[in-house]
Image (cartoon, helix red, strand yellow):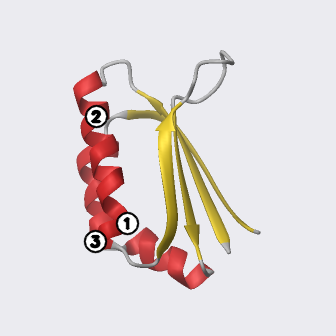
Amino acid sequence: MIHHVVLFRWNDTVTDRQLEATAAALDALPGSITEIAGYRHGPDLGLNEANYDYVVVGDFASAEDYLVYRDHPAHQRLIAEHITGRVADRAAVQFEF
């Protein structure tokens, strides 16, 4: 199993409405990409000051399935419409478990 974790810090200009639209688009993604075995996302709880603002966690049966997701047109469209231009900082890691 491949675990994919992405952390975002949003730009100061990102609105609550934009974040709601991003969350809805993320919710819809597993319906478009069958290779996604599990998908969770959400805002940071604010318990630690230096944390990122938002996390996306995806599970995939294999590295190949992750690569299909990474390059899938629905995922690329989500990035273009909801992520690009709104992110001040991003970190990502994929690991096997």
Mark 1 or 3: in front is 1
Q: Is residue 84 visible?
A: no
- Checking the image for residue 73, the label placed there is 3
The residue depicted at 66 percent of the width and 20 percent of the height is 50
Are dots 1 and 3 in contact, CB under 8 Å?
no
Image: 36 above or below 64: above
Query: At label 1, which amino acid type do we have?
Result: Pro
Nearest the viewer among 76 and 46 is 46
With 82 as the anchor, is 62 left or right in this view? right
At label 3, the amino acid type is: Pro
Q: Judging from the image, what secondary structure is the residue with disc 3 in?
A: helix
| Residue closest to the eye, 5 or 1 | 1
What residue is shown at x 27% (from left), y 52% (from top)?
Answer: 80
For the view shown, which residue lies furthest in the right direction?
97
The three-letter amino acid code for the residue at tag 2 is Glu
- Location of residue 68 in the rendering, given as x and y in whole percent from the top left corner: 44, 79
Residue corresponding to mark 1: 30
Pointer 2 residue: 20
Q: Earlier in the sequence, mark 3 or mark 2?
A: 2
Distance from the alpha carbon under mark 1 to that under mark 3: 13 Å
41 sits to left or right of 23 = right
Callout 1 secondary element: helix
Gap between marks 3 and 2, in whole Å?
A: 21 Å
Which tag is nearer the camera, tag 3 or tag 2?
Answer: 2
Q: In the figure, 63 relative to 41: above or below?
A: below
The crowding category of the residue bearing disc 2, from other C-alpha atoms within 10 Å (few below 14, some 14 to 19, many at least 20), is: few
The spot of residue 11 in percent (x, y) is 39, 25
Q: Position of residue 51 (x, y in %)?
A: 64, 26
